[in-house]
Image (cartoon, rainbow, N blue to C red):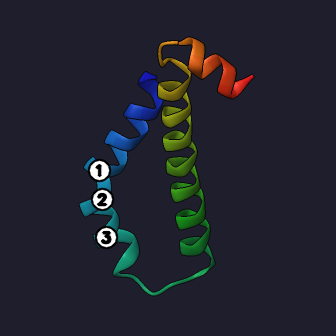
Amino acid sequence: MSLPVLVVYDAVLMFPSEVKCIWMRKFSGATIVYILVRYFGIAVALLALQQDVTWNLPQTDTACILYH
């Protein structure tokens, strides 16, 4: 669970620099690749965090019946 949290923390922390260095420049192929890679990684981290939280919920009889 710590790696997805670290990725999101990095994204929030670096956002002002990203705006200055990436978003305020003229778009190029490198800019598009950077944005795709950066936000795909953040999306994967958020999904991993969500899955980790979901899978660690307490297992009740009702939940077992619903999911199995």
Residue 47: % across, % down: 55, 42
Q: How far apart in space, not on screen, are marks 3 and 1 (Cα)? A: 11 Å
CB within 8 Å, label 2 to label 3:
yes
Where is mark 1, residue-wise? Answer: 12
Give above or below for 6 relative to 15. Answer: above
Dot 2, how many residues are within 10 Å of its Cα: few (below 14), some (14-19), or many (20+)? few
Residue nearest the viewer, comparing 35 with 59? 59
Dot 1, how many residues are within 10 Å of its Cα: few (below 14), some (14-19), or many (20+)? few
**Residue type for callout 2:** Phe
Residue depicted at 69% across the width and 26% down the height = 67
Where is mark 2, residue-wise? Answer: 15
CB within 8 Å, label 1 to label 2:
yes
Q: Secondary structure at mark 2?
A: helix
Residue 15: % across, % down: 30, 59
Residue nearest the viewer, comparing 49 with 14? 49
Give above or below for 50 relative to 32. Answer: above
Residue depicted at 38% across the width and 76% down the height = 23
**Residue type for callout 1:** Val
**Residue type for callout 3:** Val
Residue 59: % across, % down: 54, 12
Return the residue found at the far right: 68
Q: How far apart in space, not on screen, are marks 2 and 3 (Cα)? A: 6 Å
Q: Is residue 66 left or right of residue 13?
A: right
Where is mark 3, residue-wise? Answer: 19
Dot 3, how many residues are within 10 Å of its Cα: few (below 14), some (14-19), or many (20+)? few
Residue nearest the viewer, comparing 61 with 31? 61
Q: Quadrant of the C terminus?
A: top right
Residue depicted at 24% across the width and 62% down the height = 16
